[in-house]
Amino acid sequence: MCACRCGIRVHLRDGAIRYIDGNPEHPINKGVICAKGASGIMKQTSPARLTQPLRRRAGAERGAGEFEPISWDEAFRILEERLAKIRTTDPKKFALFTGRDQMQALTGLFARQFGTPNYAAHGGFCSVNMAAGMIYTIGGSFWEFGGPDLERAKLFVMLGTAEDHHSNPLKIAISKFKRAGGRFVSVNPVRTGYSAIADEWVPIRPGTDGAFLMALTCELISQGLYDRDFVARYTNGGQLVIVDPKSPRFGLLAVDEDADPVNPLYPQNQLWWDRHSNGPVITHTPNTDPNLFGDFTLTDGTRVQPAFQLLADRVRTHTPEWAESITGVPAATIRRLAHEMGITARDQKIELPIAWTDCWGNEHQTVTGNPVAFHAMRGLAAHSNGFQTVRSLAILMSLLGTIDRPGGFRHKAPFPRAIPPSAKTPTGPEGVQPNTPLAGLALGWPGSPEDLFVDEEGGPVRIDKAFSWEYPLSVHGLMHNVITNAWRADPYALDTLMIFMSNMAWNSTMNTVEVRKMLNDRVSGGETEGESEGETEGETRGEYKIPFIVVCDAFHSEMTAFADLVLPDTTYLERHDVMSMLDRPISEFDGPMDAVRVPVLPPTGECKPFQEVLIELGSRLKLPAFVDASGARKYVDYPDFIVRHETEPGSGIGFLAGWRGADGEKSMLGEPNPGQWEMYAANNCIFKHEMPPSYRYMRNWNRGYMEWAQRTRLRRWGDPILIHLYSEVLQRFRLAAQGKWPGRRPPERLAKRVETYFDPLPFYYLPLEVQATDVEKYPLAAITQRPMAMYHSWDSQNAWLRQIHAHNYLFINPRTARAQAIEDGAWLWIESQWGRVRCMGRHSEAVEPGTVWTWNAIGKQSGAWALAPDANEARKGFLLNHLIADELPALDGRISNSDPITGQAGWYDVRVRIYPAGVEEEKSVFPIFPALKAVPGMRSVPRKWLAYFAGKEIGE
Ligand code: SF4
């Protein structure tokens, strides 16, 4: 039900759900199920279910929730007509943005085939800094794509991780780890969830983890506690960087121009300064060993230094004392932790008797592990300094020699990937053409300014300005910018915005009050030029600034109220789904793994899986991937698409890697197998490919693995993936900003920004919002996390889970609360420079004194999610988003409140003050919004029923 993708078993009685339990045979959760998973039964029966396609009633205002039911035929007719017109004129006027779904390979394919660049999922406002910061450094990242090997680790350090992130799998792993005597340290402003069972809680101020990590790195280097051999061979620490400022290649890696680069896209002709011969050699030349420190001059007079020397110089002044004043973590603690990490990695080494061969032909008899493991997520990522913070973490992990080694961090297929991965977007507006698929992917991995998706003036091509000079490495897009940009027609206006499974009018928007106005705002005055669907004939009001909004969701959320067209989605129990290698598989450390869901119940009412909507639309619009050569529909339905679609004709690669080939005898690659679904169903719905032990470790540099990964087309190239302690990619952008890059340059107004933040070495800076805040007036950091029992905003319609959380509090350290005369349980105001919210507070020792925090998305708009208008969620529950801004003032206007490198939303950067509410004030939250109405097709439920048994609701 959530992104952890545990295996479940749904038990039916007379066609209704009796109960749900964890699947003991499933490798992810091994039978464990969480509160949410077991309560899926109430999700299925929720009165908030949408059950019919709906059209906004003629003349009704958006947001008023006035709809009329229409047939699917009518819904498809409206969409086909509208989208066909857009596609033949200007495909970028159609935008498709999706939430935390599990079908991005399909949604991305649809958008690309349509020809729009305006596609992304929710990564830009979730944890893109985590993905990008790690992948641009070590070629892999946490969660689906890699994680801590807690089976063998001795020390586990978790940073900025929500209380049940990666829920059941991580809970199982931590419990085993602790029973085996491992030590668990949690670095987090808040001590709940995992942090509550840590052996040591290190409270830290939000947004300062970068300083903490750099101080640890400073200590490791100054104490000589880094893994010298690992750094020398497997990172670019030994590679020589041109340090002569007059050189046109200043800051780039020195190469031997006469040597074969092997792969020009990922050249292999960089230089080391060999310790034995005291001269330059091509990197990894046999019997050489690089100097990690020094200052050298090449024969042509170019001054060079090893990248590691530059890193050591960078962190030298970043002492624990320096970090203490920023992070609030005592210098002695930082020093002690650095020492503990260093000696655990050095003195408790693991040697596994596994022979393997590296990419340079050296044979190794064992695999070595340095048993210090890390896990981190949104607490590091959701800041506008998050990319450089995550780079700092990846570098610390690398210095400890823990990458893809036992007891450290291990990749999961299809990772590791090249740095940066080879997928690219188009590079200019000409990549978007009428009636033509997009000339590249909508989302890619820029390696230099030439890979940006910009026009001749350097302006953005995408509506969210991703891959422009404002956010060059915005590899997951910036969904949080879409509504504001489209409303402002900057860089242009949209025609149709389709949103799937994302609550952009509530908890997924940083500026909720204003965004709701934007969704409902019209071009000022005058006649409409062409009426929108739903508009009464002859109306004289201007057209909506976002003319047509389509929302596909299973539930009546705050967002559905703003739709012109609502498409009712199924629940996860009513449809086929794939956890695909082309998207987010469920791979384990030891090999690729994917999974399917098969429906256990028929769709409710007229609900239709969103995948079927896309296949239908793709066929009607005759998008090439969805029709045959004659233009006839190619796929009967989604299951048929999954079985028969190949990434290219005859590639043998489809959405599922298991049971391929005509009879299901092949895996990873093979012709389509008509019986593939049945074979998955007969095998617990999972496919697992176990790699031989010699391919399971050191995959960045493992020849056997690389050859296998190329054969199975998990990887395009077989070159070693050296860790980028020093990021030449970032330096290319910085050179462009300095006017020294031979190619593209940023517009003048952005040059300073790019030059500042595209530092090839990690650095710490105050988050942009904090830079723009009077911190004397607003001294506290305010952050959120989702509660263990609810998955974002999805679960407030769940009768069982509501009994755990029906409203939230602001949690405040007692010292901080008392300083403001705020009693435990009292009503109070929390105020930022952008707005204020009235809520209830609780004293809690489990939060550091400079931080206040709450659950995200428990507070609801009255009437949404089929809750009673006076439900606790609406009267006592509050949304912190009202205090957060999506844009910050900039010299020339406004700029998104996002990381300047990746565009990651700076959710956790807001600064606030708190003060008691007056005794005369109302005892309810502020702000409050008008109650939403139920929409046609929602079943009315007597408010009294108290029990449910296998499909029967039993009242008092
Ligand atoms: S963690 Fe997520 S996938 Fe696993 S049982 Fe709970 S809700 Fe289901």
Image: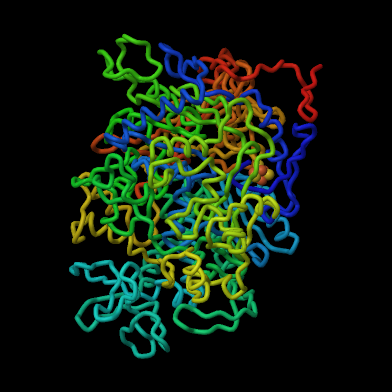
Q: Residue at x 22, y 84 (%)?
A: 299
Residue 828 spot, x, y in % from top left: 56, 24
Judge left or right: residue 607 versus residue 561. right
Q: Is residue 292 visible?
A: yes
Q: Residue at x 56, y 17 (%)?
A: 936
Question: Along the line of sight, which residue is nearer the eye, 226 or 369?
Answer: 369
Question: Along the line of sight, which residue is nearer the eye, 99 or 612?
Answer: 612
- Colouring chosen for the image of the structure: rainbow
Residue 452 spot, x, y in % from top left: 29, 51
Q: Quadrant of residue 191?
A: top right
Q: Count the marks.
A: 0
Q: Residue at x 51, y 37 (%)?
A: 782
Judge left or right: residue 103 versus residue 625. right
Judge left or right: residue 760 versus residue 129. left
Residue 610 spot, x, y in % from top left: 52, 36
Judge left or right: residue 31 versus residue 121. right
Q: Quadrant of residue 18?
A: top right
Question: Quick one: which residue is furthest to the front in this view?
Answer: 630
Question: Along the line of sight, which residue is nearer the eye, 668 or 244?
Answer: 668
Quadrant of the picture in which ligand 1 is shown: top right
| Residue 33 vertical position relative to residue 283 in the rendered view, above or below | above
Question: Along the line of sight, which residue is nearer the eye, 51 or 767?
Answer: 51
| Residue 868 vertical position relative to residue 249 in the rendered view, above or below | above
Identify the image quadrant of the C terminus.
Answer: top right
Residue 278 spot, x, y in % from top left: 33, 88
Identify the image quadrant of the N terminus.
Answer: top right
| Residue 463 vertical position relative to residue 861 in the rendered view, above or below | below
Q: Is residue 767 visible?
A: no
Q: Residue at x 40, y 72 (%)?
A: 237
| Residue 210 vertical position relative to residue 519 in the rendered view, above or below | below
